[in-house]
Image: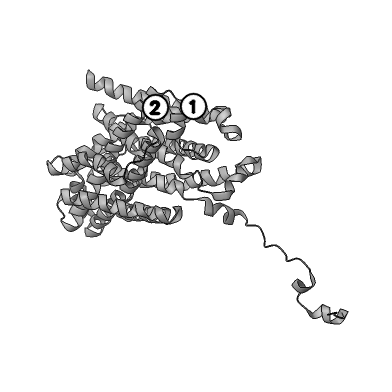
Amino acid sequence: MYLSKTEAAVLPTTLVGTPKTPPPAPTGRRRIWPLLGPAFVAAVAYVDPGNFATNFSGGASFGYTLLWVIVAANLMAMLIQSLTAKLGLATGRDLATLCRERLPRPVTWGLWVQAEAVAIATDLAEIVGGAVALNLLFGVPLPIGGLITAVVAFALLGAQSRGHRPFERVITGLLLVIGAGFAYTLFGAGVDLGGVAGGMVPSFDGPESLVLATGILGATVMPHVIYVHSALTPGRYGDVVTAGKTEQGRRRLLRAQRLDVLLAMGMAGLVNAAMLVIAAQLFTGNADEVTSLEGVHAGLGDQLGTGAALAFALALLASGFASSSVGTHAGQVVMAGFLKRHIPVLARRLVTLTPALAVLVLGGDPTTALVWSQVVLSFGIPFALVPLLWLTSRRDLMGGWVNRRVTTVVGGVVAALIIGLNAHLLIGFVS
């Protein structure tokens, strides 16, 4: 069949062989936003129930004095989580796996043992916090509340079976609940700008403030999410990872990763600061009345009304549920990476759950257990941070993703500060 020029002119261009105009390439935000998410999963661990205990204890006991510790710890967290995300992007493997591949076997086993101790301390904080929240909201006995928190964590973790996006959305939603709860309470409590300015000056107020500072550091820079964040980025970006082979592609992925960390850790830092500010505003001079999470809940109700008490309890519940599921995932990453073995999630959960349930069943003080669990976490930070710095500074492993010299130096200073603070605390206990 032959068409005249006139007939051909009125036909769609696709019928006469003219190629389609390609759709416009995604621009700016459309290219970056789909890459965000892993840092928000990690950020939940930075506002787990252990943070509630240490931050409210610090604010009630010492006012704004330890606010600088929260700010410094959050800046450290941004650096550390940025490095661990970059490690996963560059190598396609997580930190625990790379330690197993690159370090002697005895060292690997030692790192695994301390990582499991960290997992137990993490579970203690999360399960106890969730149990306390259920008790405050519904009067559920603490041991039953601990079991309910563990079951909900399983359910949340099950969202991973449908891909990374559903899990990230659930966790991010719970993070927003936590943030909204403290934004509401902070609005009612108010802020002393002079106190904030004074709290930004590094100082301590006796040995007890040093213990709480170490707990705040352990509750903010979480060693188990140093492992888990590196496991969230490999394969997270699909075929986009191939772009990492070019300088332009690396810059794009690094921008996305840094924005992810900045937004997520920034939000976590604001929540932590809000906790301490609320305690400093409402409870300074009356620290004996808020020596427990139950006391904080009651104190908020007395001073700001039932709305603030309800917001606190809901934020604590969201924190316990979300951080417990992330902690379970971290335990799987640690065992698979260091030992190259997988055990059923239920069996693993029972091992780390037992100490938390023991505290609840035996009637131990939940808040004291939370504070000391964060001190244990602080001692675990160097065992994850030092290998992370060593690996990300190796050009033979990282290629074009290798740390700049200044990044490695700053990371080394951070590690030295953390180790020094822990050593000072230990020496103080011994003497």
The quadrant in which the C terminus is found is top left
Q: CA distance from mark 1 to mark 2?
A: 15 Å
Q: Secondary structure at mark 2?
A: helix
What colouring style does the render use? Answer: one colour
Q: Report whether 261 appears left or right of 319.
A: right
Q: In terms of depth relative to the viewer, which is nearer, 159 or 202?
A: 159
Residue 323 falls left or right of residue 10: left
Up the image or down, 217 lies above or below 5; here it is above
Q: Is residue 413 above or below residue 173?
A: above
- SS of the residue under disc 1: helix
Task: Tell me the number on the disc at residue 362.
Answer: none
The percent coordinates of residue 148 (x first, y second) are 22, 53
Front tag of 1 and 2: 2
Question: Percent x, y for residue 192?
Answer: 33, 45
User: Residue 416: percent from the left, percent from the top?
Assistant: 41, 24
Say which residue label 2 marks: 108
- Seen in the picture, residue 160 relative to 280 is either above or below; the reply is below
> Depth check: 114 or 141 in front?
114
Residue drawn 31% across the image and 55% down it: 155
The residue at the point 16 percent across, 55 percent down is 140
* Residue 228 shows in this picture: yes
Q: Identity of the amino acid at label 1?
A: Trp
The answer to which of 392 and 78 lies nearer the viewer is 392
Residue 291 at least partly seen: no
The one nearer the camera, 99 or 426, is 99
Judge whether 46 appears above or below 384 on screen. Answer: below
Q: Quadrant of residue 355?
A: top left
Residue bearing the label numbered 1 = 390
User: Mark 2 packing: few (<14 Cα in 10 Å), some, or many (20+)?
Assistant: many
Three-letter code for the amino acid on which mark 2 is drawn: Thr
Question: Which residue in the rendered view is the most extreme toward the right?
Answer: 5
Rendered image quadrant of residue 28? bottom right
